[in-house]
Image (cartoon, grey):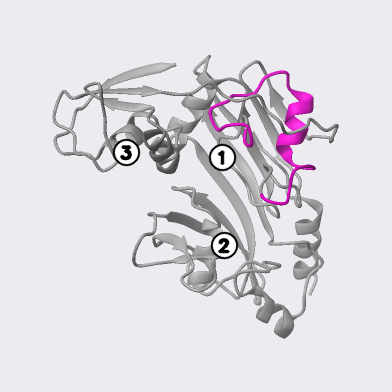
Amino acid sequence: MIQTFKADNLNERLDVFLTRMRPDFSRAHIQRLIAEGCVLVGGVLRKGNFRLKLEDEVSLEVPDAKNVEILPENIPLDILYEDNDIIVINKARGMVVHPAAGISSGTLVNALLYHCRDLSGINGEIRPGIVHRLDKDTSGVMVAAKNDKAHISLAKQIQDKTAHRTYIAIVWNNIKEEAGIIRGDIGRHPTDRKKMAIVQDNGKPAVTHFKVLERFGDCTLVECRLETGRTHQIRVHMTHIGHPLVGDPKYGAAKHGKIKGNFAIQGQALHSVSLELTHPTTGERMKFTSPVPDDMEKILNKLRNK
């Protein structure tokens, strides 16, 4: 499929322009397509840092999706909603969303391939249908796209912040404020490449809104609403303000566990409680919710009965 665009900003980088035109593609994906010769400016190959002039004609050829080689698996899914365009899942804690290095089975993608006849091919053979993701040990609502039209619509809603994602989390320590906004660019941790961190250089803007729902002295139950969707965003932002998530093995929760006693939960106490979006075909505004999972409910009951 070949698409043609007219440059509408003077001196904008080619890769930045195409990322804006195709919000369903990451900038890294666009840069790969440019490097593979899939992009022309006025019929000429250019690099990603090429500066466009107004009305420059940019053509993008998106290769056909490869046949998916990830095997379908009959893994039970908690389906909240499904039609010809989207499928909304209540993801279990502990389930990886898509295959990665060393993980080729047992993922949500394996389950979706078994359950669904079609999934969008925009994100390639490893992540078919995946518009956004949840960490392995984060549970709750997420949506997958069954076709490219739905994928493009959902990705644009996330980029434009018209799709609303709300989480609940149990964090260590008493948050004094009733509500707040955490801002801080997120990028790779400077010394631990398996972690993310708030960084001064080469990070991506990230904004998290939080509201206190319940206080327990040593812990606080909070609602978090994402304005952006960076890797580990809530975990990094809450840790940054001194309130790491209960059970989080990466971001400072271990020392709290040793001091204050661990709760029985595998991974961080974080749950995607609601997702609001506009249906890609009907235009209907839809909201999907997921109840607090049993492992977090047990922690809350223990805190309430102290």
Secondary element type, mark 1: loop
Q: Earlier in the sequence, mark 1 or mark 2?
A: 1
Q: Which residue is mark 1?
A: 132
Q: Which residue is mark 3?
A: 15
Residue 5 position in % (x across, y down):
28, 21
* Disc 1 versus disc 2: nearer the observer: 1
Residue 93 painted magenta: no
Answer with the quarter of the image where residue 146 lies.
Answer: top right
**Mark 2 surroundings: few (<14), some (14-19) or many (≥20) residues within 10 A:** many
Q: Say which amino acid is labelled 3.
A: Asp
* Number of marks drawn: 3
Q: Confirm whether residue 4 shows in the render.
A: yes
Please state which of residues 122 and 51 is positioned toward the viewer in this rendering: 51
Above or below, 45 against 196 in this view is above
Q: Which residue is mark 2?
A: 235
Please state which of residues 72 and 102 is positioned toward the viewer in this rendering: 102
Q: Earlier in the sequence, mark 1 or mark 3?
A: 3
**Mark 1 surroundings: few (<14), some (14-19) or many (≥20) residues within 10 A:** some
Task: Report the magenta residues as a range.
Answer: 101-127
The residue under the point 57% across, 24% down is 65
Q: Earlier in the sequence, mark 3 or mark 2?
A: 3
**Magenta residues, dominant SS class:** loop
Answer with the quarter of the image where residue 75 lies.
Answer: top right
Secondary element type, mark 3: helix
Residue 51 position in % (x across, y down):
19, 38
Quadrant including the N terminus: top left
Left or right, 266 with reference to 146: right
Q: Say which amino acid is labelled 2.
A: Arg
